[in-house]
Amino acid sequence: MRARGQRVKCAVLVVGTSFLVAACGGGGNGDNSANSNADTGPQKKGGSLTVLAEVGYNGAWPAGLDPATNTNGAANQSYMTSIFGQLFELREGGKIVPTLASGYTAKNGGTEFDIKLRPGVKFTDGAPFDADTVAWHFNRVLKSQCTCRPNWPTLKSVKAQGADTVVITFAAPNAAFIDSLIVSNANWVASKKSLDAMGERALIRAIQHARDDGAIVIIIAHRPAIMQVADKLLVLEYGRVTQFGPRMDVIPATMPGEVSREVAAK
């Protein structure tokens, strides 16, 4: 990596950023004449969509659409529900009905809950809507700054059990656990695959901007894709340097063939 003139800046860069992009559409019984001259050719990505929003929700967007980083989830819950769906839904008469979940079981005097997930569900990016993802999401939103984060003070653990069961364990009985999901951001589950990919691309852009500004950037990473922006690589094993040199020399010597070719080609 380079420095301009005599100025050398060194940074250990740790960046984690995620973005979500979604589109929603709907229909009604209104005038469809605006569509009469619409392009009837192949569908294309991109473009714009104009929607009519309820007045009470206008402007409630500054925190974004990631359930864990959105700090005004209560204000735009209708939007979030339209995008992510819900594990459980509140129906007329206060009845709670499983939607993306298929049901739940309370055990051990209300200190343990098994949430069963509906089989065969996938995110739009193709990732499975499975127990690992939901458990990861629960643990993530517990750290959220939103007032809509779960309030589970006696929580002991959230773990996946197989592909379709999430086990939530409390230190004391929690009779209101399922009810509490309805009013928290735990009820909206985002795709870990998409968040990881978007965050990785944001990190690469940040590194590239730092280099363009004349910085020397030192990265400690385990993700192969990050290596595409490196000039040199240093490999440590048990605290000892085993490889150091230009990226194109080190990668073939340390990585499996398929990954090696993919990273080296970028």
Image (spheres, rainbow, N blue to C red):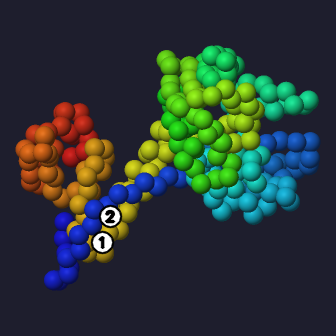
In the picture, the quarter occupied by the N terminus is bottom left
Query: What is the x, y in percent for residue 76?
Result: 74, 52
Residue 83: x %, y % from top left: 68, 42
* Left or right, residue 22 beside residue 24: left
Q: Is residue 74 left or right of residue 252?
A: right
Q: Are marks 2 and 1 in contact (CB under 8 Å)?
A: yes
- The label number, if any, that marks residue 158 in the structure image: none
What kind of residue is marked 2? Gln
Which residue corresponds to mark 2?
208
Give the structural element (helix, strand or loop) at label 2. helix
Provide the residue designation for mark 1.
212
- Kind of residue indicated by mark 1: Asp
**SS under mark 1:** helix
Q: Is residue 220 left or right of residue 6?
A: right
The location of residue 8, given as percent across then percent down, is 20, 76
Between 53 and 174, the one lying in front of the other is 174
Residue 83 in view of the camera? no
